[in-house]
Amino acid sequence: MLIDALERLAPVAPADRTLVLTNASLVDAIRRVAPDLPAANVIAEPRPAGTAAALGWAAKLIADRAGHDAVIVSIHADWAIGDVDGFRAALTAAADAAEQEHALVTVGVVPSRPDTGLGYIEPGEVVRGDLRRVARFIEKPDLAKAIALVNAGCLWNSGIFAWRAGDILDEIAAHCPEIAPALAAHPNDANAFFAEATPIAIDVGVLERSSRVLVVPGDFGWSDVGTWAALRAVRQRDEDGNAPAGRVLLRDATENVVHAVGTTVVCYGVDGLVVVALDGMTLVTTVERAADLKTLIDALPPEVLAR
């Protein structure tokens, strides 16, 4: 998926102007599969500290290399994109708006369905054309609220952002005490910065607190594959709506996501489950709860996580 993301970006951002933010354990693997990326452009986070810390550190690096006026576009690698040209057009529109308006710009995806696993954006006042101010961000809703939000014209919060390096650094300094002091104290020491930063998402730490946030709509067949349940949207499904991978046997089973590596999984008489069997561990949850695995992970004992 990382390679797919890099290939989608190549026409608008060559390798020498593309940074990959990742954890330290993946650096060598990323350099092997993406040899065109300069080694200095694969940035290892010493520890996970949330998207605000990751994007703040990236903005600081880009400002040092290219100046505070440099425009940054941020995307995630775990997406499936149906209309690549439309995707690039949305990124370009967001980047143009960020440069012209000196704003923090997000791309809100036009919903194809009510989805309880995604956050939403309520567009507000029109700035120009399709560009609007963000009235509010809405956390993952229940189904009834998701239906109401879609009917009201709200957009999915995609996690696509565009801003000038200086603008995001200014907004972090003004609104994000979770990471701003650490960034000011350790501008050249990633280990010290990430050690002191308080983990927080960029949406919560900056965007929800800033008055400079705009949104442009995007409609390009976007699917967030960041959860196991989301694989139903991108995998080949059988006639009963199941999305299996590996040695999987399904009988009287519908709308399940099953991923088996090194073992066989048999599902009988069950619906709407997510089953992941990998490296001697098996996870079983529901499609609805699969988007909330962070709560589970935080509660697991260390000996389980160590596996």
Image (cartoon, rainbow, N blue to C red):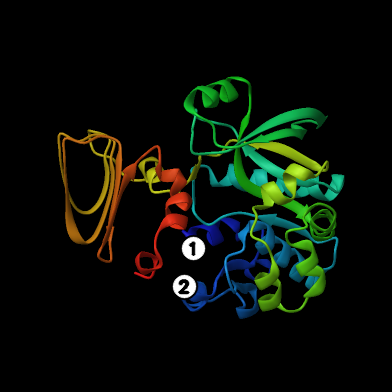
SS for dot 1:
helix
- Give yes or no for contact between labels 2 and 1 (Cβ–Cβ under 8 Å): yes
* Residue where numbered disc 2 is placed: 33
Q: Disc count in the image?
A: 2
In this picture, residue 143 sits left or right of residue 234: right
Task: Give the residue at x 65% y 63%.
Answer: 54
Distance from Cα at disc 2 to Cα at disc 1: 8 Å
Residue 135 image-quadrant placement: top right
Q: Is residue 29 above or below residue 261?
A: below
In this picture, residue 142 sits left or right of residue 228: right
Let me know if residue 11 appears in the view.
no
Mark 1 neighbour density, 10 Å: few (under 14) some (14–19) many (20 or more): few
Q: Amino acid at mark 2?
A: Val
Q: Is residue 65 above or below residue 225?
A: below
Mark 2 neighbour density, 10 Å: few (under 14) some (14–19) many (20 or more): few
In this picture, residue 89 sits left or right of residue 5: right
Task: Give the residue at x 49% y 75%.
Answer: 25
Q: Is residue 69 above or below residue 33?
A: above
In x, y percent, where is residue 41? Answer: 64, 73
Residue 69 image-quadrant placement: bottom right
The circle on residue 3 is 1
Task: Give the residue at x 49% y 63%.
Answer: 3
* Between 232 and 200, the one nearer to me in the picture: 200
Q: Amino acid at mark 1?
A: Ile
Task: Report the quarter where the C terminus lies.
Answer: bottom left
In this picture, residue 54 sits left or right of residue 125: left
